[in-house]
Amino acid sequence: MEASVAIQSLPAAANDEELIRIVDEVIAYIAASGYNYYVGPFETTIEGPYDELMDIVKECQHIAIRAGAPSVAAYIKVSYKPEGEVLSIERKVGKYHS
């Protein structure tokens, strides 16, 4: 696994319930990608090939808009190592989630 990306999707929403509904659609899209992912309280982390993860990041914004958000902001963190392995989600936090 050459990359790990954390995405915090922040769609504009009328209320908390609408915000959660839209973010849930974004997370469902990430889950459907087939890549290993981890949902945290502020962001979702996904692991896989760099270029494919960047496409997923891009599509997350479109998903939020199609779900009804008039606008969306996102915070993205990327760990990329083209010649090797980045630290996995399991290695970083697995010991805390058994």
Image (cartoon, rainbow, N blue to C red):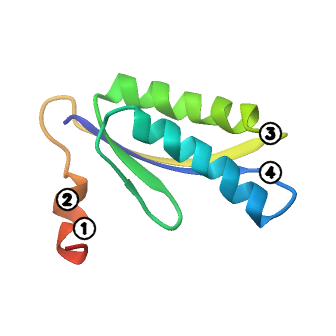
Q: What is the three-letter code of the residue carrying label 2?
A: Glu
Crowd band around label 4 with a 10 angstrom C-alpha radius: few (<14), some (14–19), many (20+):
some
**Marks 1 and 3, Cα distance to the nearest angstrom?**
33 Å
The residue to which callout 3 is attached is 68
Dot 1 lies on which element? helix
The residue to which callout 1 is attached is 93
The residue to which callout 4 is attached is 12
Residue 90, numbered circle: 2
Dot 3 lies on which element? loop
**Marks 1 and 4, Cα distance to the nearest angstrom?**
30 Å
Seen from the viewer's position, the closer of residues 1 and 24 is 24
Mark earlier in primary sequence (2, 3): 3
Task: Tell whether 54 sits left or right of 15.
Answer: left
**Marks 2 and 3, Cα distance to the nearest angstrom?**
33 Å
Seen from the viewer's position, the closer of residues 6 and 33 is 33
Mark earlier in primary sequence (1, 4): 4
Q: Are marks 1 and 4 in contact (CB under 8 Å)?
A: no
Q: Residue at x 19, y 74 (%)?
A: 98
Q: Residue at x 62, y 51 (%)?
A: 23
Q: Are marks 2 and 1 in contact (CB under 8 Å)?
A: yes
Q: Is residue 79 visible?
A: no
- Residue 11, position as x, y percentages in the image: 73, 49
Q: Which of the 4 quarters of the picture holds residue 93?
A: bottom left
